[in-house]
Image: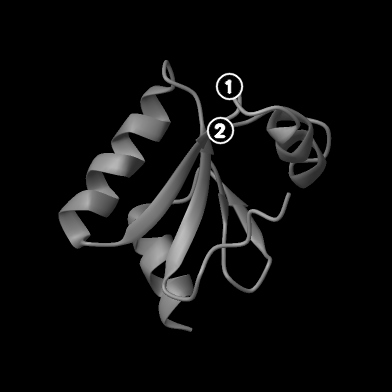
Amino acid sequence: MDFTPDSGTITMFSTTWCGYCNRLKKQLDAQGIGYTEINIEEVEGTADLVEQLNGGNRTVPTVLFPDGTAATNPSAAEVKSRLAA
């Protein structure tokens, strides 16, 4: 599956119990930044994808940008900046 987001949005790989994920979602919501959330515990193959993007670590939130690059546990400011670039 291709999880690359549309321009101006991100794909965020997360889990329900991740505090950093919940914080980032609240910050993105407050700033009006669109995202698609993918729970790596529910969507087959996404935990493996997150590990590939993070050098073997299953770290969330992992964010995928429209240009195909990724960031691990980014701030909302970093997300906004990278989307504007």
* Figure quadrant of residue 59: top right
User: Residue reaching furthest front?
Assistant: 1
Which mark, by number, is residue 60?
Answer: 2
Label 1: how many Cα within 10 Å (few below 14, some 14–19, many 20+):
few
Above or below for 34 versus 36: below
Label 2: how many Cα within 10 Å (few below 14, some 14–19, many 20+):
many
Of pointers 2 and 1, the one earlier in the residue sequence: 1
What amino acid does circle 1 point to? Glu
Q: Is residue 5 left or right of residue 16?
A: right
Instruction: Give how far across and how far down residue 85 sits, in percent.
Output: 48, 84
Above or below for 61 versus 58: below
Instruction: Give how far across and how far down residue 44 sits, in percent.
Output: 71, 27
**What residue appears at the point 83 percent right and 32 percent down from the top-left corner?**
56
**What residue appears at the point 51 percent right and 32 percent down from the top-left corner?**
14
- Of badges 2 and 1, the one in the foreground is 1
Which mark, by number, is residue 42?
Answer: 1
